[in-house]
Amino acid sequence: MDHNALDEAVDDKGLGRSARGTARVRAGLGVAAVLAVAVPSLMPTVAQADPASRAATTWSTETLAPGLEVRTGTIRHADVTHTWTVTVQSPAVSRLTGAATWSEVGTRSWADATARQLRDADLQPRVESVRWPAYSDTPHGTMGLRVRIGSFSTQAAAQSAAAAITSAGFHTAVAWTGYDIQQPADRENVHVAVIDPRVFNGSIEGTHDGNVAQRETTSSVAARLRSLVAVNGGFFVTSNADGVQGTMSGLGAYDGQLGSMAVGSRAALILGDGGRHIRVADLTTTVTARAGHSSYRIQGINRVPGLVRDCGRPGASPSDLPWQDVTCRSTDDLVQFTTGFGAELPTGPGVQAVLDASGRVISVGARGGRVPAGGRVLQGIGGAADWLTANAEVGSRVRVDEVIRDTSGRRVELDGDDSVVSAAPTLVKNGRVDIDAAAEGVVDPQDLSFGYAWANTRQPRTMAGVDRKGRLILATVDGRQTGGSEGFTLQEAAQFMRSLGAVQALNLDGGGSTAMAVRGTLVNNPSDATGERAVGDTVQVLPDAD
Protein backbone atom coordinates (compact mmCIF):
# COMPACT_ATOMS: atom_id res chain seq x y z
CA MET A 1 0.00 0.00 0.00
CA ASP A 2 2.25 2.66 -0.51
CA HIS A 3 2.69 0.92 -1.34
CA ASN A 4 0.60 -0.75 -0.91
CA ALA A 5 -0.67 1.84 0.59
CA LEU A 6 -2.44 3.65 -1.89
CA ASP A 7 0.86 4.46 -3.34
CA GLU A 8 -0.39 5.91 -6.50
CA ALA A 9 -2.60 7.85 -4.16
CA VAL A 10 -4.67 8.52 -7.02
CA ASP A 11 -2.03 9.88 -9.28
CA ASP A 12 -3.92 8.16 -12.10
CA LYS A 13 -7.00 10.16 -11.15
CA GLY A 14 -5.16 13.38 -10.74
CA LEU A 15 -5.08 13.68 -6.94
CA GLY A 16 -1.40 14.38 -6.36
CA ARG A 17 0.71 12.29 -4.00
CA SER A 18 0.62 12.89 -0.27
CA ALA A 19 3.99 13.21 1.37
CA ARG A 20 5.20 10.14 3.21
CA GLY A 21 6.44 10.85 6.65
CA THR A 22 4.73 9.79 9.88
CA ALA A 23 4.25 10.02 13.52
CA ARG A 24 2.28 8.75 16.33
CA VAL A 25 0.55 10.37 19.26
CA ARG A 26 1.66 8.14 20.90
CA ALA A 27 -17.91 -25.65 -2.55
CA GLY A 28 -20.06 -28.43 -0.71
CA LEU A 29 -23.65 -27.49 -1.56
CA GLY A 30 -22.68 -25.94 -4.86
CA VAL A 31 -23.69 -22.51 -6.00
CA ALA A 32 -27.00 -21.23 -4.80
CA ALA A 33 -29.15 -19.14 -7.05
CA VAL A 34 -28.01 -15.54 -7.09
CA LEU A 35 -30.65 -13.51 -5.33
CA ALA A 36 -30.96 -9.77 -5.57
CA VAL A 37 -31.87 -8.68 -2.07
CA ALA A 38 -31.90 -5.50 -0.08
CA VAL A 39 -30.03 -5.80 3.19
CA PRO A 40 -30.62 -2.63 5.20
CA SER A 41 -28.46 -3.80 8.11
CA LEU A 42 -25.45 -3.88 5.81
CA MET A 43 -25.80 -0.27 4.77
CA PRO A 44 -22.87 1.79 6.00
CA THR A 45 -23.32 5.31 7.22
CA VAL A 46 -21.14 8.06 5.82
CA ALA A 47 -19.33 10.29 8.25
CA GLN A 48 -19.21 14.00 7.51
CA ALA A 49 -21.53 13.47 4.58
CA ASP A 50 -24.95 15.07 4.22
CA PRO A 51 -27.23 13.01 6.50
CA ALA A 52 -30.18 13.75 4.24
CA SER A 53 -28.51 11.93 1.37
CA ARG A 54 -30.02 8.43 1.07
CA ALA A 55 -27.98 5.38 0.10
CA ALA A 56 -29.55 2.63 -2.00
CA THR A 57 -27.82 -0.74 -1.67
CA THR A 58 -28.57 -3.82 -3.74
CA TRP A 59 -26.99 -7.12 -2.79
CA SER A 60 -26.58 -10.47 -4.49
CA THR A 61 -25.81 -13.49 -2.34
CA GLU A 62 -24.06 -16.73 -3.25
CA THR A 63 -23.53 -19.72 -0.95
CA LEU A 64 -20.28 -21.49 -1.79
CA ALA A 65 -20.41 -24.11 0.97
CA PRO A 66 -22.20 -24.61 4.26
CA GLY A 67 -21.10 -21.75 6.46
CA LEU A 68 -19.58 -19.73 3.60
CA GLU A 69 -21.48 -16.97 1.84
CA VAL A 70 -20.34 -14.25 -0.53
CA ARG A 71 -22.33 -11.04 -0.97
CA THR A 72 -21.79 -8.49 -3.71
CA GLY A 73 -23.25 -5.03 -3.37
CA THR A 74 -23.32 -1.57 -4.85
CA ILE A 75 -23.99 1.43 -2.64
CA ARG A 76 -25.35 4.37 -4.60
CA HIS A 77 -26.14 7.95 -3.68
CA ALA A 78 -28.22 9.05 -6.66
CA ASP A 79 -28.71 12.62 -5.44
CA VAL A 80 -25.00 13.41 -5.20
CA THR A 81 -23.07 15.14 -7.98
CA HIS A 82 -19.28 15.23 -8.08
CA THR A 83 -16.93 17.17 -10.31
CA TRP A 84 -13.28 17.71 -11.02
CA THR A 85 -11.65 20.66 -9.27
CA VAL A 86 -8.24 22.20 -8.65
CA THR A 87 -6.72 22.19 -5.17
CA VAL A 88 -4.08 24.76 -4.27
CA GLN A 89 -1.69 23.06 -1.89
CA SER A 90 -0.05 24.44 1.22
CA PRO A 91 3.73 24.33 1.68
CA ALA A 92 4.73 22.03 4.53
CA VAL A 93 7.71 20.36 6.15
CA SER A 94 7.80 16.65 6.97
CA ARG A 95 8.07 16.32 10.73
CA LEU A 96 9.96 13.05 10.34
CA THR A 97 12.53 13.92 7.69
CA GLY A 98 12.55 17.73 7.73
CA ALA A 99 12.08 17.74 3.94
CA ALA A 100 9.94 20.37 2.24
CA THR A 101 6.67 18.99 0.91
CA TRP A 102 3.04 19.96 0.22
CA SER A 103 -0.19 19.49 2.11
CA GLU A 104 -3.83 19.24 1.02
CA VAL A 105 -4.88 21.41 3.96
CA GLY A 106 -3.32 24.35 5.76
CA THR A 107 -3.87 26.90 8.47
CA ARG A 108 -6.49 29.65 8.49
CA SER A 109 -3.86 32.33 7.91
CA TRP A 110 -2.42 30.44 4.93
CA ALA A 111 -5.87 29.82 3.45
CA ASP A 112 -6.91 33.47 3.82
CA ALA A 113 -3.66 34.76 2.34
CA THR A 114 -3.77 32.27 -0.53
CA ALA A 115 -7.40 33.07 -1.34
CA ARG A 116 -6.55 36.77 -1.39
CA GLN A 117 -3.62 36.19 -3.75
CA LEU A 118 -5.80 34.10 -6.05
CA ARG A 119 -8.46 36.80 -6.19
CA ASP A 120 -5.76 39.37 -6.98
CA ALA A 121 -4.83 37.10 -9.91
CA ASP A 122 -8.47 37.28 -11.14
CA LEU A 123 -9.23 33.77 -9.93
CA GLN A 124 -12.23 32.74 -7.85
CA PRO A 125 -11.17 30.48 -4.97
CA ARG A 126 -13.35 28.80 -2.39
CA VAL A 127 -12.11 27.96 1.10
CA GLU A 128 -13.39 24.69 2.55
CA SER A 129 -13.12 23.51 6.13
CA VAL A 130 -11.83 19.94 6.57
CA ARG A 131 -12.66 18.19 9.83
CA TRP A 132 -10.79 15.42 11.56
CA PRO A 133 -12.35 11.99 11.02
CA ALA A 134 -13.53 10.25 14.18
CA TYR A 135 -10.19 8.69 15.08
CA SER A 136 -9.74 7.66 18.69
CA ASP A 137 -6.35 9.29 19.14
CA THR A 138 -6.34 12.52 17.12
CA PRO A 139 -7.89 15.94 17.71
CA HIS A 140 -11.55 16.57 16.97
CA GLY A 141 -13.08 19.44 15.03
CA THR A 142 -11.34 21.30 12.23
CA MET A 143 -8.18 19.74 10.83
CA GLY A 144 -7.45 22.65 8.51
CA LEU A 145 -8.66 24.56 5.51
CA ARG A 146 -8.49 23.68 1.85
CA VAL A 147 -8.38 26.12 -1.06
CA ARG A 148 -9.97 25.08 -4.34
CA ILE A 149 -10.89 26.63 -7.66
CA GLY A 150 -13.58 25.67 -10.14
CA SER A 151 -15.86 22.74 -10.89
CA PHE A 152 -15.14 20.92 -14.15
CA SER A 153 -17.00 18.16 -15.95
CA THR A 154 -13.80 16.52 -17.24
CA GLN A 155 -10.37 15.83 -15.85
CA ALA A 156 -8.79 17.42 -18.92
CA ALA A 157 -10.58 20.70 -18.27
CA ALA A 158 -9.41 20.69 -14.66
CA GLN A 159 -5.85 19.95 -15.74
CA SER A 160 -5.92 22.86 -18.16
CA ALA A 161 -7.10 25.18 -15.39
CA ALA A 162 -4.47 23.81 -13.02
CA ALA A 163 -1.72 24.60 -15.53
CA ALA A 164 -2.85 28.22 -15.70
CA ILE A 165 -3.02 28.49 -11.90
CA THR A 166 0.43 26.94 -11.56
CA SER A 167 1.84 29.45 -14.02
CA ALA A 168 0.52 32.16 -11.71
CA GLY A 169 2.84 30.89 -8.98
CA PHE A 170 0.75 28.36 -7.06
CA HIS A 171 1.28 24.64 -6.38
CA THR A 172 -1.77 22.71 -7.59
CA ALA A 173 -3.27 19.25 -7.82
CA VAL A 174 -6.33 18.09 -9.76
CA ALA A 175 -8.91 16.40 -7.55
CA TRP A 176 -12.19 14.49 -7.93
CA THR A 177 -14.63 15.60 -5.23
CA GLY A 178 -16.01 12.07 -5.00
CA TYR A 179 -12.89 11.13 -3.04
CA ASP A 180 -13.69 13.69 -0.33
CA ILE A 181 -15.38 12.57 2.85
CA GLN A 182 -17.49 15.74 3.05
CA GLN A 183 -20.09 14.27 0.68
CA PRO A 184 -21.19 10.68 0.03
CA ALA A 185 -19.58 8.83 -2.85
CA ASP A 186 -21.48 8.42 -6.12
CA ARG A 187 -21.01 4.67 -5.92
CA GLU A 188 -19.10 2.06 -3.96
CA ASN A 189 -18.77 -1.53 -5.21
CA VAL A 190 -18.25 -3.95 -2.33
CA HIS A 191 -17.67 -7.69 -1.90
CA VAL A 192 -18.19 -9.41 1.43
CA ALA A 193 -17.42 -13.00 2.44
CA VAL A 194 -18.81 -14.35 5.71
CA ILE A 195 -17.36 -17.60 7.06
CA ASP A 196 -18.90 -19.36 10.06
CA PRO A 197 -16.22 -21.68 11.52
CA ARG A 198 -18.89 -23.59 13.48
CA VAL A 199 -20.44 -24.74 10.20
CA PHE A 200 -17.74 -24.44 7.54
CA ASN A 201 -15.74 -27.67 7.21
CA GLY A 202 -12.72 -26.19 5.49
CA SER A 203 -9.90 -24.07 6.88
CA ILE A 204 -8.81 -20.44 6.81
CA GLU A 205 -5.17 -19.48 6.68
CA GLY A 206 -2.84 -16.62 6.11
CA THR A 207 -0.20 -17.71 3.65
CA HIS A 208 2.80 -16.56 1.67
CA ASP A 209 2.49 -19.83 -0.26
CA GLY A 210 5.86 -21.21 0.78
CA ASN A 211 8.17 -18.30 0.00
CA VAL A 212 8.14 -14.98 1.84
CA ALA A 213 10.52 -13.50 -0.72
CA GLN A 214 8.08 -13.49 -3.62
CA ARG A 215 5.09 -11.54 -4.89
CA GLU A 216 2.06 -13.22 -6.43
CA THR A 217 -1.46 -12.09 -7.22
CA THR A 218 -4.18 -13.08 -4.78
CA SER A 219 -6.15 -14.87 -7.50
CA SER A 220 -3.17 -16.91 -8.75
CA VAL A 221 -2.46 -18.21 -5.25
CA ALA A 222 -6.18 -18.91 -4.81
CA ALA A 223 -6.34 -20.86 -8.07
CA ARG A 224 -3.30 -22.94 -7.16
CA LEU A 225 -4.64 -23.72 -3.68
CA ARG A 226 -8.17 -24.20 -5.05
CA SER A 227 -9.51 -21.89 -2.37
CA LEU A 228 -13.14 -20.85 -2.25
CA VAL A 229 -12.48 -17.23 -1.28
CA ALA A 230 -9.29 -15.22 -0.96
CA VAL A 231 -8.29 -11.63 -0.20
CA ASN A 232 -4.95 -9.87 -0.12
CA GLY A 233 -3.26 -9.60 3.25
CA GLY A 234 -0.79 -7.24 4.89
CA PHE A 235 1.70 -4.55 3.88
CA PHE A 236 4.81 -5.69 2.03
CA VAL A 237 7.97 -4.38 0.40
CA THR A 238 7.45 -3.21 -3.18
CA SER A 239 10.83 -1.67 -4.01
CA ASN A 240 14.35 -3.07 -3.94
CA ALA A 241 15.43 0.14 -2.24
CA ASP A 242 13.34 -0.85 0.79
CA GLY A 243 14.37 -4.50 1.05
CA VAL A 244 13.43 -7.75 -0.67
CA GLN A 245 10.21 -7.37 -2.63
CA GLY A 246 7.33 -9.43 -1.29
CA THR A 247 8.64 -9.66 2.26
CA MET A 248 6.19 -8.38 4.82
CA SER A 249 6.64 -5.02 6.52
CA GLY A 250 4.77 -6.20 9.59
CA LEU A 251 3.95 -9.32 11.54
CA GLY A 252 3.27 -12.44 9.49
CA ALA A 253 3.05 -16.04 10.68
CA TYR A 254 2.37 -19.04 8.47
CA ASP A 255 1.95 -22.71 9.42
CA GLY A 256 2.70 -21.77 13.01
CA GLN A 257 6.04 -20.07 12.25
CA LEU A 258 6.96 -16.40 12.33
CA GLY A 259 7.79 -15.17 8.85
CA SER A 260 8.26 -11.53 9.85
CA MET A 261 8.15 -9.37 12.96
CA ALA A 262 5.78 -6.68 14.13
CA VAL A 263 6.64 -3.02 13.61
CA GLY A 264 5.42 -1.52 16.84
CA SER A 265 2.04 -2.52 18.24
CA ARG A 266 -0.25 -2.85 15.23
CA ALA A 267 -3.48 -4.61 14.33
CA ALA A 268 -3.37 -8.28 13.37
CA LEU A 269 -5.83 -10.97 12.29
CA ILE A 270 -5.15 -14.14 14.28
CA LEU A 271 -6.40 -17.31 12.59
CA GLY A 272 -6.07 -20.01 15.22
CA ASP A 273 -6.62 -23.72 14.62
CA GLY A 274 -7.00 -23.33 10.88
CA GLY A 275 -9.57 -20.57 11.32
CA ARG A 276 -11.63 -22.28 14.01
CA HIS A 277 -10.72 -19.52 16.45
CA ILE A 278 -10.40 -16.00 15.08
CA ARG A 279 -9.70 -12.67 16.73
CA VAL A 280 -8.26 -9.23 16.01
CA ALA A 281 -5.68 -7.73 18.35
CA ASP A 282 -2.72 -5.37 18.39
CA LEU A 283 0.38 -7.55 18.58
CA THR A 284 4.07 -7.08 19.33
CA THR A 285 6.94 -9.53 18.86
CA THR A 286 10.11 -10.11 20.86
CA VAL A 287 12.75 -12.47 19.45
CA THR A 288 16.00 -13.24 21.24
CA ALA A 289 19.12 -15.16 20.21
CA ARG A 290 20.86 -16.94 23.11
CA ALA A 291 24.36 -18.45 23.09
CA GLY A 292 25.41 -19.84 26.44
CA HIS A 293 24.89 -17.08 29.02
CA SER A 294 24.85 -14.32 26.40
CA SER A 295 21.85 -13.03 24.48
CA TYR A 296 21.05 -10.47 21.77
CA ARG A 297 17.72 -9.11 20.54
CA ILE A 298 16.72 -10.03 17.01
CA GLN A 299 14.96 -7.06 15.41
CA GLY A 300 13.89 -8.61 12.12
CA ILE A 301 12.94 -11.86 10.43
CA ASN A 302 13.42 -12.37 6.68
CA ARG A 303 14.34 -8.79 5.85
CA VAL A 304 17.49 -6.94 4.82
CA PRO A 305 19.58 -5.98 7.86
CA GLY A 306 19.53 -2.23 8.36
CA LEU A 307 16.28 -1.60 6.45
CA VAL A 308 13.07 -1.48 8.49
CA ARG A 309 10.03 -0.87 6.32
CA ASP A 310 7.29 0.98 8.24
CA CYS A 311 9.81 1.54 11.06
CA GLY A 312 8.55 0.53 14.52
CA ARG A 313 11.64 -1.38 15.77
CA PRO A 314 13.92 -0.33 18.67
CA GLY A 315 17.01 1.47 17.47
CA ALA A 316 15.59 2.36 14.07
CA SER A 317 16.22 5.87 12.76
CA PRO A 318 14.73 8.38 12.51
CA SER A 319 11.99 6.75 14.60
CA ASP A 320 11.28 3.54 16.48
CA LEU A 321 7.54 4.18 16.17
CA PRO A 322 5.39 2.86 13.29
CA TRP A 323 5.44 5.13 10.24
CA GLN A 324 3.44 3.82 7.29
CA ASP A 325 5.37 3.53 4.02
CA VAL A 326 8.55 4.95 5.53
CA THR A 327 11.77 2.94 5.58
CA CYS A 328 13.83 3.48 8.70
CA ARG A 329 17.42 2.40 9.08
CA SER A 330 19.52 0.72 11.73
CA THR A 331 23.29 0.41 11.99
CA ASP A 332 23.07 -2.30 14.68
CA ASP A 333 20.72 -5.03 13.53
CA LEU A 334 20.36 -8.78 14.02
CA VAL A 335 18.05 -10.51 11.53
CA GLN A 336 16.95 -14.15 11.35
CA PHE A 337 16.26 -15.90 8.04
CA THR A 338 14.05 -18.98 7.98
CA THR A 339 13.49 -21.73 5.43
CA GLY A 340 10.51 -19.68 4.24
CA PHE A 341 12.98 -17.23 2.69
CA GLY A 342 13.31 -18.84 -0.73
CA ALA A 343 15.78 -16.40 -2.26
CA GLU A 344 19.46 -15.60 -2.13
CA LEU A 345 20.38 -14.11 1.23
CA PRO A 346 21.31 -10.42 1.37
CA THR A 347 24.99 -9.64 1.05
CA GLY A 348 27.03 -6.73 2.38
CA PRO A 349 29.01 -5.71 5.45
CA GLY A 350 28.54 -7.76 8.59
CA VAL A 351 28.59 -11.39 9.65
CA GLN A 352 26.29 -14.37 9.34
CA ALA A 353 26.00 -17.60 11.28
CA VAL A 354 24.41 -20.62 9.61
CA LEU A 355 22.54 -22.93 11.97
CA ASP A 356 21.19 -26.44 11.46
CA ALA A 357 17.78 -27.67 12.60
CA SER A 358 19.01 -28.12 16.19
CA GLY A 359 20.54 -24.64 16.37
CA ARG A 360 24.14 -25.90 16.05
CA VAL A 361 26.40 -23.43 14.26
CA ILE A 362 27.55 -24.86 10.94
CA SER A 363 29.55 -21.87 9.75
CA VAL A 364 30.34 -18.23 10.53
CA GLY A 365 31.43 -15.83 7.83
CA ALA A 366 30.44 -13.35 5.18
CA ARG A 367 26.77 -12.72 4.42
CA GLY A 368 25.17 -14.51 1.47
CA GLY A 369 24.15 -17.89 0.11
CA ARG A 370 20.86 -19.59 1.03
CA VAL A 371 19.12 -20.86 4.13
CA PRO A 372 19.91 -24.59 4.52
CA ALA A 373 17.04 -27.07 4.50
CA GLY A 374 15.59 -27.28 7.99
CA GLY A 375 17.98 -24.63 9.31
CA ARG A 376 18.18 -20.91 9.77
CA VAL A 377 20.64 -18.07 9.29
CA LEU A 378 21.44 -15.13 11.55
CA GLN A 379 22.87 -12.01 9.92
CA GLY A 380 24.25 -9.14 11.95
CA ILE A 381 25.60 -5.67 11.26
CA GLY A 382 27.23 -3.29 13.72
CA GLY A 383 27.13 -4.50 17.30
CA ALA A 384 25.08 -7.52 16.26
CA ALA A 385 27.92 -8.63 13.97
CA ASP A 386 30.35 -8.34 16.89
CA TRP A 387 28.05 -10.45 19.06
CA LEU A 388 27.80 -13.18 16.43
CA THR A 389 31.57 -13.23 16.00
CA ALA A 390 32.11 -13.56 19.74
CA ASN A 391 29.37 -16.05 20.53
CA ALA A 392 28.42 -18.10 17.46
CA GLU A 393 31.32 -20.51 17.32
CA VAL A 394 31.21 -23.44 14.91
CA GLY A 395 29.87 -26.44 16.81
CA SER A 396 28.20 -24.35 19.51
CA ARG A 397 24.46 -23.85 19.71
CA VAL A 398 22.39 -20.69 19.39
CA ARG A 399 18.80 -20.86 20.63
CA VAL A 400 16.16 -18.45 19.31
CA ASP A 401 13.19 -17.61 21.52
CA GLU A 402 10.10 -16.00 19.97
CA VAL A 403 7.33 -14.29 21.92
CA ILE A 404 4.14 -12.72 20.53
CA ARG A 405 1.92 -10.71 22.89
CA ASP A 406 -1.22 -8.62 22.64
CA THR A 407 -1.70 -5.30 24.41
CA SER A 408 -3.07 -7.00 27.53
CA GLY A 409 0.18 -8.95 27.84
CA ARG A 410 -1.48 -12.19 26.80
CA ARG A 411 0.93 -14.46 24.96
CA VAL A 412 -0.11 -15.73 21.53
CA GLU A 413 1.10 -19.29 21.10
CA LEU A 414 1.51 -20.62 17.56
CA ASP A 415 0.87 -24.20 16.48
CA GLY A 416 1.22 -25.70 13.02
CA ASP A 417 -2.28 -24.72 11.87
CA ASP A 418 -2.14 -21.14 13.18
CA SER A 419 -1.43 -18.06 11.08
CA VAL A 420 -1.34 -14.30 11.55
CA VAL A 421 -1.77 -11.53 9.00
CA SER A 422 -1.26 -7.93 10.08
CA ALA A 423 -1.65 -4.39 8.78
CA ALA A 424 -3.06 -1.16 10.25
CA PRO A 425 -4.99 0.39 11.78
CA THR A 426 -7.62 -1.16 14.04
CA LEU A 427 -11.10 -0.17 12.81
CA VAL A 428 -13.56 -1.68 15.30
CA LYS A 429 -12.93 -2.71 18.89
CA ASN A 430 -15.43 -4.14 21.36
CA GLY A 431 -18.26 -3.46 18.94
CA ARG A 432 -17.47 0.25 18.51
CA VAL A 433 -15.63 2.21 15.85
CA ASP A 434 -12.19 2.68 17.38
CA ILE A 435 -9.52 3.80 14.89
CA ASP A 436 -6.10 4.34 16.48
CA ALA A 437 -4.74 6.00 13.36
CA ALA A 438 -1.96 8.00 15.01
CA ALA A 439 -0.75 5.22 17.32
CA GLU A 440 -0.47 2.82 14.38
CA GLY A 441 1.40 5.38 12.31
CA VAL A 442 -0.95 6.13 9.43
CA VAL A 443 -1.61 9.80 10.26
CA ASP A 444 0.25 12.47 12.20
CA PRO A 445 -1.77 15.21 13.93
CA GLN A 446 1.35 17.38 13.97
CA ASP A 447 2.10 16.94 10.26
CA LEU A 448 -0.92 17.19 7.99
CA SER A 449 1.23 16.50 4.93
CA PHE A 450 1.53 12.89 6.07
CA GLY A 451 -1.11 10.25 5.41
CA TYR A 452 -3.90 12.56 4.25
CA ALA A 453 -4.73 10.72 1.02
CA TRP A 454 -3.85 7.35 2.59
CA ALA A 455 -6.32 7.65 5.42
CA ASN A 456 -8.70 10.55 4.94
CA THR A 457 -9.75 10.29 1.31
CA ARG A 458 -11.61 7.45 -0.40
CA GLN A 459 -9.41 4.62 -1.57
CA PRO A 460 -9.74 0.91 -2.42
CA ARG A 461 -9.72 -0.99 0.88
CA THR A 462 -9.54 -4.57 2.14
CA MET A 463 -10.92 -5.22 5.62
CA ALA A 464 -11.28 -8.16 7.98
CA GLY A 465 -13.32 -8.58 11.14
CA VAL A 466 -15.12 -10.92 13.50
CA ASP A 467 -18.77 -10.72 14.58
CA ARG A 468 -20.35 -11.71 17.91
CA LYS A 469 -20.91 -15.26 16.68
CA GLY A 470 -17.24 -15.69 15.84
CA ARG A 471 -17.82 -15.48 12.09
CA LEU A 472 -15.00 -14.08 9.96
CA ILE A 473 -15.92 -11.16 7.69
CA LEU A 474 -13.65 -10.40 4.72
CA ALA A 475 -14.57 -7.33 2.69
CA THR A 476 -13.26 -5.25 -0.20
CA VAL A 477 -14.35 -1.99 -1.76
CA ASP A 478 -13.14 -0.87 -5.18
CA GLY A 479 -11.80 2.65 -5.49
CA ARG A 480 -10.05 5.28 -7.62
CA GLN A 481 -12.69 4.81 -10.31
CA THR A 482 -14.50 8.05 -11.03
CA GLY A 483 -18.02 7.25 -12.10
CA GLY A 484 -17.38 3.63 -11.10
CA SER A 485 -16.47 3.07 -7.47
CA GLU A 486 -14.76 5.59 -5.29
CA GLY A 487 -13.76 3.59 -2.22
CA PHE A 488 -13.86 4.26 1.53
CA THR A 489 -11.97 6.49 3.89
CA LEU A 490 -10.67 4.70 6.98
CA GLN A 491 -13.64 6.02 8.93
CA GLU A 492 -16.09 4.75 6.32
CA ALA A 493 -14.31 1.39 6.29
CA ALA A 494 -14.78 1.13 10.05
CA GLN A 495 -18.45 2.11 9.87
CA PHE A 496 -19.02 -0.37 7.05
CA MET A 497 -17.48 -3.23 9.01
CA ARG A 498 -19.52 -2.33 12.06
CA SER A 499 -22.68 -2.24 9.91
CA LEU A 500 -21.88 -5.83 8.91
CA GLY A 501 -21.90 -6.81 12.56
CA ALA A 502 -18.15 -6.80 13.21
CA VAL A 503 -17.20 -6.37 16.85
CA GLN A 504 -13.51 -6.45 15.96
CA ALA A 505 -12.04 -5.30 12.65
CA LEU A 506 -8.84 -4.08 11.05
CA ASN A 507 -7.71 -2.48 7.84
CA LEU A 508 -5.61 -4.76 5.64
CA ASP A 509 -3.46 -3.62 2.72
CA GLY A 510 -5.42 -1.60 0.18
CA GLY A 511 -5.00 0.61 -2.83
CA GLY A 512 -3.82 -1.34 -5.85
CA SER A 513 -3.35 -4.40 -3.63
CA THR A 514 -7.07 -4.75 -2.87
CA ALA A 515 -8.34 -8.01 -4.37
CA MET A 516 -10.94 -10.69 -3.74
CA ALA A 517 -11.01 -14.00 -5.59
CA VAL A 518 -13.88 -16.51 -5.56
CA ARG A 519 -12.97 -20.05 -6.65
CA GLY A 520 -9.68 -18.67 -7.96
CA THR A 521 -11.27 -15.97 -10.13
CA LEU A 522 -10.85 -12.29 -9.39
CA VAL A 523 -14.27 -10.74 -8.68
CA ASN A 524 -13.42 -7.14 -7.83
CA ASN A 525 -11.94 -4.42 -10.04
CA PRO A 526 -8.38 -3.49 -8.90
CA SER A 527 -7.26 0.09 -9.31
CA ASP A 528 -3.82 -0.40 -10.88
CA ALA A 529 -3.77 0.36 -14.60
CA THR A 530 -1.81 -2.87 -15.14
CA GLY A 531 -4.47 -4.98 -13.42
CA GLU A 532 -4.28 -7.13 -10.32
CA ARG A 533 -1.18 -6.44 -8.27
CA ALA A 534 1.22 -9.13 -7.12
CA VAL A 535 1.23 -8.97 -3.32
CA GLY A 536 2.94 -10.49 -0.29
CA ASP A 537 0.70 -12.64 1.85
CA THR A 538 -3.00 -13.47 1.42
CA VAL A 539 -5.92 -14.88 3.41
CA GLN A 540 -7.26 -18.06 1.82
CA VAL A 541 -10.53 -19.87 2.65
CA LEU A 542 -9.84 -23.49 1.71
CA PRO A 543 -12.29 -26.37 1.18
CA ASP A 544 -12.20 -29.47 3.34
CA ALA A 545 -9.21 -31.55 2.27
CA ASP A 546 -11.42 -34.66 2.34
Image: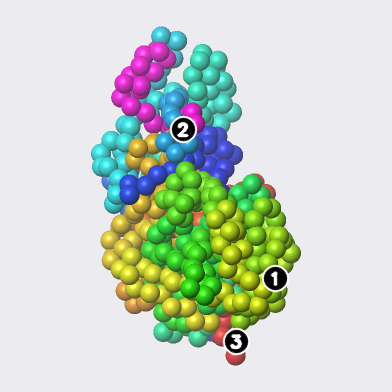
Write down the residue under mark 3. Answer: 545
Counting residues from the start of the chain, the first of labels 2 and 1 encountered is 2
What's the CA distance linking mark 3 and mark 1? 41 Å
Q: Is residue 197 above or below residue 448?
A: below
Q: Residues within 10 Å of mark 1 (few under 14, many from 20)?
A: some
Query: Residue at the location (43% across, 28% down)?
Result: 92
Q: Is residue 480 left or right of residue 243?
A: left
Based on the picture, tell me whether residue 109 belongs to the magenta stretch. yes
Mark 1 — residue? 363
**Residue 10 is at least partly visible in this image:** yes
Q: CA distance from mark 3 to mark 2?
A: 54 Å
Q: Which region is colored magenta?
A: 99-119
- x and y percent of residue 405 in the render? 39, 69
- Spatial distance from mark 2 to mark 1, Cα to Cα? 43 Å
Percent of width and height locating residue 173: 51, 29
Q: Is residue 310 above or below residue 106?
A: below
| Residue 415 placement (x, y as % from top left) | 49, 81
Residue contact at pointers 2 and 1, CB within 8 angstroms = no
